[in-house]
Image (cartoon, rainbow, N blue to C red):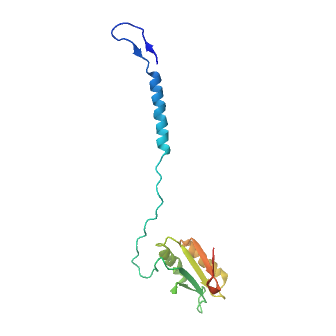
Amino acid sequence: MAFSTAGSGSTGPKMNVTPLIDVLLVLIIVFMVVVVEEQPVGLRTEIPQASSKSKSIPPPQRTIVIQLRRAKPGEEHPQVLVNEEAVAWDQLRERLRDIFAIRIQRIAYIEAEDDIDFQAVADVIAVARLAGVDRVGLLTEGGKHIHG
């Protein structure tokens, strides 16, 4: 820092404050960068799901099993049951969407009789995916399952 001794009179010596202002500006910029990079990071939480008033939707603890049985005479699609409850083929997507709307884990299992064409199973898997099911398992004989 330099003092100016030029000039005489009552004003006296003057201090050169330009270097001080430069240092203060650099410090302000440094603090601004530090504060911007220290954004608070929140905790990931899961908000409780609102309870459903409908009695027909199974509680979230229950496993969802979609069963395919032989088609009744005169029907083109096999009979579909969701947890032993018969569901019309054209209502399957809405029914699955209602069931999985209140669930955190969106897993469904599909069980088909031996004489069911695999195209029908693939169609049910596609409908389940469109309804919001994340994982689909295939149940085999003996109760073992395969995740897909």
State the residue lying farthest toward the left. 10
Q: Quadrant of residue 5?
A: top left
Q: Residue at x 53, y 79 (%)?
A: 64
Task: Tally the marks.
Answer: 0
| Figure quadrant of the C terminus | bottom right
The residue lying at 55 percent from left, 81 percent from top is 65
Residue for point 44% across, 82% down: 56
Location of residue 145 in the rendering, given as x and y in whole percent from the top left corner: 62, 80
Position of residue 139 measured from the top left corner of the image (x, y, whole percent): 62, 82
Residue drawn where x is 43% and y is 14% of the image: 3
- Judge left or right: residue 145 versus residue 35: right
Q: Residue furthest bottom?
A: 73
The location of residue 14, given as percent across then percent down, is 40, 15
Residue 50 falls in image quadrant: bottom left
Q: Is residue 94 above or below residue 6?
A: below
Residue 15 appears in the figure: yes
Look at the picture and state if 57 lies above or below 134: below
Vertical position of residue 106 compared to residue 23: above or below: below
Report the front residue among 11 and 101: 11
Residue farthest top in this picture: 8
Residue 62, image x and y in percent? 50, 80
Q: Is residue 78 visible?
A: no
- Judging depth in this view, the residue of 52 and 17 nearest the camera is 17
In the image, residue 11 above or below residue 36: above
